[in-house]
Amino acid sequence: MIVRNSPVSPRRPVNSTPETPAEAPSNTVAQTRPHQQDTFTGAATALQRTAKVGAAPVGNHGTLMREYLTGARPPPADFEKVMGYKPFTIQTKHGQRMQDPHGSASAPGKVGPDKEFDPAAKTHDYGYDLLRYYAKKGTPLAPEARKAADALFREDLFHFANDQKGLGSRIKFRAWAQIYATAVELNSRVQNHGPP
């Protein structure tokens, strides 16, 4: 004895509406979901795949840099992994600053008050490392970011100079502040305000 079952109608997708028996053809092929391509395969490099994670935020990069340097914005999530250190915070008379623990005032031949200007230099070095970080991620910051880092460096140097007690000390440190700040700004101009 041969038993034949009636044909089975294909399984409806979960998001479809119910069919009536009259609408269901008896010999249809089961529908399948389209294959979704894996976004992590293909010709994309590892840098291209991670660049979206650490991409530079849109908006004014000068404001962004100042927020990073003053601690108003935390470092990017993978900054420590990419750059090899975790910035730390100090409180100054003129506000909070984020710093590179390995940074220093890198005056040629250690000319001038490099030890006195060291806190300003550590903040400035963190700013330049942010420029390098975003360049490594494939989304370099706009020139305004480097200009903002240089401007805050100048500001901090002059704060230090103006905080000195005696007139002679203020004049001396203002002269050195002008020299250090101008040297940094000229170097930035030579490098087109891009990553150092």
Image: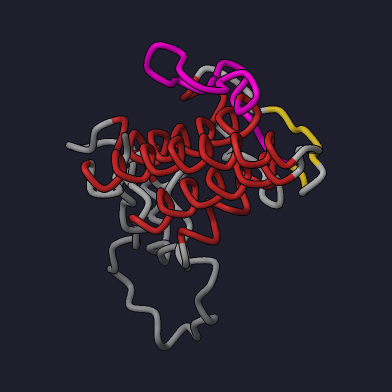
Seen from the viewer's position, the closer of residues 154 and 47 is: 154
Q: Which residues are magenta?
A: 97-117
Q: Position of residue 180 (x, y in %)?
A: 45, 35
Any magenta on residue 107?
yes
**In the image, farthest residue toward the left:** 43
- Tell me how many marks there are: 0
Seen from the viewer's position, the closer of residues 8 and 169 is: 169
Q: Is residue 33 above or below residue 95?
A: below
Residue at 55% in and 30% down: 121
Would you say 15 lies left or right of 115 here? left
Residue at 68% in and 40% down: 170
Q: Position of residue 5 (x, y in %)?
A: 42, 57
Residue 185 image-quadrant placement = top left
Q: Is residue 18 above or below residue 123?
A: below
Q: Quadrant of the C terminus?
A: top left
Residue 26 image-quadrant placement = bottom left
Residue 89 image-quadrant placement = top right
Seen from the viewer's position, the closer of residues 78 and 107 is: 107
Q: Position of residue 181 (x, y in %)?
A: 45, 42
Residue at 55% in and 21% down: 114
Residue at 59% in and 25% down: 100
Seen from the viewer's position, the closer of residues 37 and 151 is: 151
Q: Is residue 16 above or below residue 122?
A: below
Majority secondary structure in the magenta region: loop
